[in-house]
Amino acid sequence: MAASKASAVDHDKKVAHELSKLLADSYTLYQKTHGYHWNVTGPTFSSLHALFMEQYTEMWNAIDDIAERIRALGELAPQSGSALGNLTSIKDGDPTFSSEEMLKDLKSGHETVIATLKSVVELSEEVGDVSSADLATQRLTAHEKHLWMIKATLS
């Protein structure tokens, strides 16, 4: 019994670590999207300003769920800029980008988050963590929709 308890704790730590990467990627993409909302210019300003607001608002609401899942697994959620910066695979946005460059940058960011989410789903399912797998699957659906909207806008 003690061995299975130890492996459950190890599984929780591994999933929490993957969720921490997801939190960092999600938070960085949220910040980038919000920044582009502020700084977008050009003839598509109004539609992109609204699209970015819709997406950053949705991501903002989800970030808390990810952090709370990390806590439910018994680990501390990363909270500082440096902790999140060390975990993320997404680079900061550039406010001087054209609207098309912003869209391409966000496309890349969502693709990164989707890859991170797939890793979380895979690990969670492997260790039998249905709650983390469910959270990641819901987030995967949301980011795939965001990516679709961005791709459609770029077409």
Image (cartoon, rainbow, N blue to C red):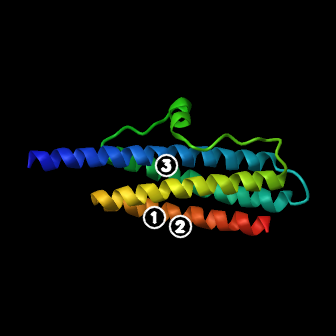
Where residue 24 appears, as percent x and y from the top left, is: 52, 43
Q: Is residue 22 above or below residue 126?
A: above
Closest to the observer, 35 or 140: 140
Q: Position of residue 46 (x, y in %)?
A: 83, 59
Callout 1: SS: helix
Disc 1/disc 3 C-alpha distance (Å): 12 Å
Q: Label 1 neighbourhood size at 10 Å, few (<14), some (14-19), many (20+)?
A: some
Location of residue 125 with respect to 15 vertically, above or below: below
74 lies left or right of 99: left
Tell me the element at label 3. Answer: helix
Is residue 46 at least partly visible in the picture?
yes
Please tell me how crowded label 3 is: few (under 14), some (14-19), or many (20+) other residues with Cα within 10 Å. Answer: many
Residue for badge 1: 137
The residue at which mark 2 appears reads as 141
- Name the disc covering residue 22, or none: 3
Q: Amino acid at mark 1?
A: Thr
Q: In percent of the image, x 52 and y 34: which residue is there?
A: 86
Can residue 132 be seen at all in this image of the molecule? no
Residue at 64% from the left image edge and 52% from the top image edge: 109
CA distance for labels 2 and 1: 6 Å
Residue 6 is left or right of residue 52, and the answer is: left
Q: State which quadrant residue 17 falls in.
A: top left
